[in-house]
């Protein structure tokens, strides 16, 4: 039978040799130094020395002494026997014949190696597991593995698997219940009623209020932007953003909110009061900021695609239409001025260097020459056409599309006032002028006359100054407030992306400094955080240990410096390293590099993802939160686009396309419905299982080594770190 949350296989691997240790592990845990040999050598007979060595190294590796010391991989026994000079490793079989010998060795090793019994450290372990469960919300298996590691680090003998499992399960359950009770206690009677109302289905509706509010925008338009802001306002009006949840670890709150966002209302109703209302509170707090995130995401896409990009495209089309007229007019002017230069300038003989006077001496003679090529009437028409079709000399390259942008004010009119009202903007010093201008725009809208004193003219850079202050249709002493509004929106778009302007009630678009704990908030969270990270209460103690380690390392390196001919000290005591001469690359290496580069395909990231999906079927792991079997057509294309958007932190804009699978509405729907922690985990598991089945991967160790740092997972089965999955953070990062 499985031991609660552990499978039979996992329970059997606990505190046992589940597999042969790797060469690295043999060298780390089973190498016998001088102190080890001093303990081993006094033992009589080869089998006693070998058995003592097995017990000593096994407790380092597994954290337990073996009841049956012969139950050890042959590779371990051979490695130890070789170090001890024992020719016949099979002598270990005789070690178990006398039980008292084994017990004496265990008592000696416990004393010498300073190992303690589990009962002596149980209270401390409970406190540590409680702190970790409270701050991280890790699953029982992850906590179990972490607890076993904690015991090994402190030289505490591991208890039986059932004992440790039950301790972890009990402490985790208590931490969860404390989380629910704490959140439940933060709510007033009225707030509890408001949250419970989210699970009801209003008359005539098909879904609960919670289902309705957790669905984000699916189209790119001004009215949809207005709806997104109204949704954010409605969620904020629930008042849950005012509940002080700062005492709750953000990771636990996020975990609880994911359950509320992904789960069905009917399922949430079945939970007890504390868990149900705690989940709804975490969900409402999450949706309060998520709704603002959705609105600002849509604003970013709307400005980038529907306004700026479209205006640029339409302006480019208009320029193409006028290009033939501009070319003809320019050609006539060029021909006329060529004659002016040729006839009114001194001529130089390139052979002799002699100067000749101009060919014409009077203005009338010059015009006669010009009109032989371009009649004066056509020349005047060409000049008029160029004045009409080209921007003024003091203009810039952006004026044309910005003027086109102003004509699209109807797109932003529905939501401008609501944007300032719903989103609680803040700004760094560089963004304060833009924020002040944004808040003033709603007061200017609809007025017939707005004076220059009512706007911030310091924001009018480039062609915006002409469009706002000097547009042809303006009355003297007035400004174009529509152009000014777009000038502010363009700068807001840029400032939001650089976080110079941020939304206080947003997560993705919020102030990156806001999540740093300080003052009372840090003092309150400090004990739990330090306990979970195994750090001392005072920084001085930790820094002193680090300084001692650095000093020891420095002295060790300094002792070897005199023997190193590549290191030289100058008269001022400065350290110099001899330059390393590069080894010349052989021709065969250059040929190999060129051949490999020639064989490597040049593909985009989405194409690589789609190719992997076709091999592994990992896209099938992304299922709808509704649990239905129906899948959208070309769903794998949408998922690949979203994974690229999130993992590269570029947002929707670069992956939006004309295909149905790449339209904003489809992307937003799939992002909200299919991409969540559970589906990320399932997709990760599929990818890891497939990779482990590749023959080359098996030769290299099963593929359980992180390429970023070469760290081995230490398990032949699927490890927790690889299958944990990750949610998107403020950086927009997702993993699959």
Image (tube, rainbow, N blue to C red):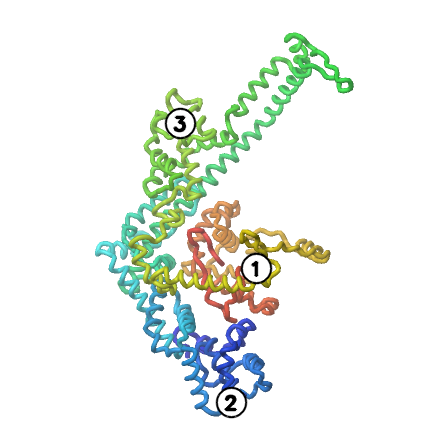
Please say if 572 is above or below 92.
above
Name the image quarter holding residue 358. top right
- Residue behind mark 3: 480
Q: Earlier in the sequence, mark 2 or mark 1?
A: 2
| Left or right of 118, for residue 53 | right
Which residue in the protein does label 1 denote? 614
Instruction: Give the number of the mark in front: 2 or 1.
Output: 2
Residue 170 percent coordinates (x, y): 33, 72
Residue located at (34% from left, 30% from top): 444
Residue at (35, 42) in percent of width and height:
425
Q: Which residue is more in the foreground, 207 or 103?
A: 103
Tell me the number on the disc at residue 44: 2
Secondary structure found at label 3: loop
Q: Is residue 404 visible?
A: yes
Q: Earlier in the sequence, mark 2 or mark 3?
A: 2
Mark 3 vs 1, N-terminal side? 3
CB atoms of marks 2 and 1 within 8 Å:
no
Q: CA distance from mark 2 to mark 1?
A: 63 Å
x and y, in percent, of residue 262 in the image:
38, 58
Looking at the rendered structure, the secondary structure element under dot 2 is: loop
Q: Is residue 228 left or right of residue 610?
A: left
**Which quadrant is the N terminus positioned in?**
bottom left
């Amino acid at each position: 039978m499985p031991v609660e949350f552990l499978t039979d296989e996992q329970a059997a691997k606990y505190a046992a040799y589940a597999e042969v240790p790797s060469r690295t592990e043999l060298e780390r845990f089973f190498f016998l130094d001088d102190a080890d040999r001093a303990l081993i050598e006094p033992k009589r007979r080869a089998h006693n020395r070998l058995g003592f060595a097995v017990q000593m190294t096994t407790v380092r590796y597994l954290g337990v002494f073996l009841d049956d010391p012969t139950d050890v991989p042959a590779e371990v026994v051979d490695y130890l026997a070789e170090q001890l000079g024992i020719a016949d490793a099979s002598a270990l079989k005789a070690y178990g014949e006398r039980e008292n010998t084994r017990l004496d060795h265990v008592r000696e090793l416990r004393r010498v190696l300073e190992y303690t019994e589990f009962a002596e450290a149980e209270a401390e372990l409970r406190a540590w597991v409680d702190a970790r469960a409270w701050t991280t919300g890790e699953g029982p298996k992850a906590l179990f593995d972490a607890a076993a590691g904690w015991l090994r680090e402190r030289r505490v003998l591991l208890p039986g698997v059932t004992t440790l499992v039950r301790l972890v399960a009990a402490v985790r359950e208590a931490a969860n219940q404390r989380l629910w009770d704490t959140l439940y206690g933060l709510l007033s009677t009225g707030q509890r009623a408001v949250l419970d109302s989210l699970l009801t289905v209003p008359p005539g509706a098909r879904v609960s209020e919670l289902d309705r509010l957790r669905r984000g925008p699916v189209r790119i338009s001004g009215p949809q932007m207005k709806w997104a802001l109204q949704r954010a306002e409605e969620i904020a009006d629930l008042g849950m953003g005012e509940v002080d949840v700062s005492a709750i670890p953000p990771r636990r709150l996020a975990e609880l909110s994911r359950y509320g966002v992904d789960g069905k209302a009917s399922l949430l109703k079945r939970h007890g009061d504390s868990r149900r209302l705690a989940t709804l509170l975490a969900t409402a707090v999450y949706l309060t900021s998520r709704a603002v995130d959705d609105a600002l995401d849509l604003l970013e896409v709307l400005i980038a695609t529907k306004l700026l990009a479209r205006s640029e495209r339409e302006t480019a089309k208009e320029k193409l239409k006028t290009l033939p007229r501009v070319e003809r007019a320019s050609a006539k002017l060029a021909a006329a001025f060529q004659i002016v230069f040729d006839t009114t300038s001194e001529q130089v003989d390139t052979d002799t260097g002699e100067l000749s006077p101009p060919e014409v001496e009077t203005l009338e003679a010059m015009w006669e020459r010009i009109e032989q090529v371009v009649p004066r009437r056509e020349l005047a028409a060409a000049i008029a056409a160029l004045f009409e079709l080209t921007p003024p000399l003091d203009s810039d390259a952006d004026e044309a599309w910005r003027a086109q942008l102003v004509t699209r004010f109807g797109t932003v009119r529905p939501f401008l006032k609501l944007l300032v009202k719903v989103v609680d903007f803040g700004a760094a010093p560089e963004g304060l002028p833009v924020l002040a201008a944004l808040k003033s725009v709603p007061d200017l809208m609809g007025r017939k006359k707005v004076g220059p004193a009512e706007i911030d003219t310091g924001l009018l850079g480039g062609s915006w100054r002409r469009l706002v202050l000097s547009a042809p249709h303006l009355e003297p002493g007035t400004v174009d407030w529509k152009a000014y509004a777009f000038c502010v929106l363009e700068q807001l778009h840029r400032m939001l992306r650089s976080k110079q302007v941020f939304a206080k009630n947003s997560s993705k678009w919020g102030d990156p400094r806001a999540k740093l704990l300080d003052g009372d908030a840090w003092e309150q969270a400090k004990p739990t955080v330090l306990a979970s990270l195994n750090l001392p209460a005072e920084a001085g103690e930790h820094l002193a240990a680090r300084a001692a380690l650095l000093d020891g390392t420095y002295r060790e390196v300094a002792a070897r410096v005199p023997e190193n001919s590549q290191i030289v000290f100058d008269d001022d005591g400065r350290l110099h390293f001899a330059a390393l001469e590069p080894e010349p690359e052989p021709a065969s290496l250059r040929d190999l590099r060129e051949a490999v580069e020639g064989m490597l395909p040049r593909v985009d990231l989405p194409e690589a993802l789609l190719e992997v999906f076709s091999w592994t079927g990992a896209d099938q792991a992304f299922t709808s939160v509704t649990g239905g079997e129906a899948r959208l057509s070309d769903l794998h294309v949408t998922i690949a686009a979203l994974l690229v958007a999130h993992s590269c932190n570029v947002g929707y804009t670069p992956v939006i396309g004309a295909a149905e699978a790449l339209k904003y509405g489809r992307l937003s729907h799939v992002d909200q419905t299919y991409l969540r922690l559970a589906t990320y985990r399932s997709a990760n598991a599929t990818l890891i299982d497939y990779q482990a089945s590749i023959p080359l991967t098996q030769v290299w160790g099963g593929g359980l080594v992180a390429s970023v740092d070469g760290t081995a997972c230490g398990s032949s089965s699927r490890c927790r770190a690889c299958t944990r999955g990750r949610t998107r953070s403020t950086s927009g990062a997702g993993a699959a």
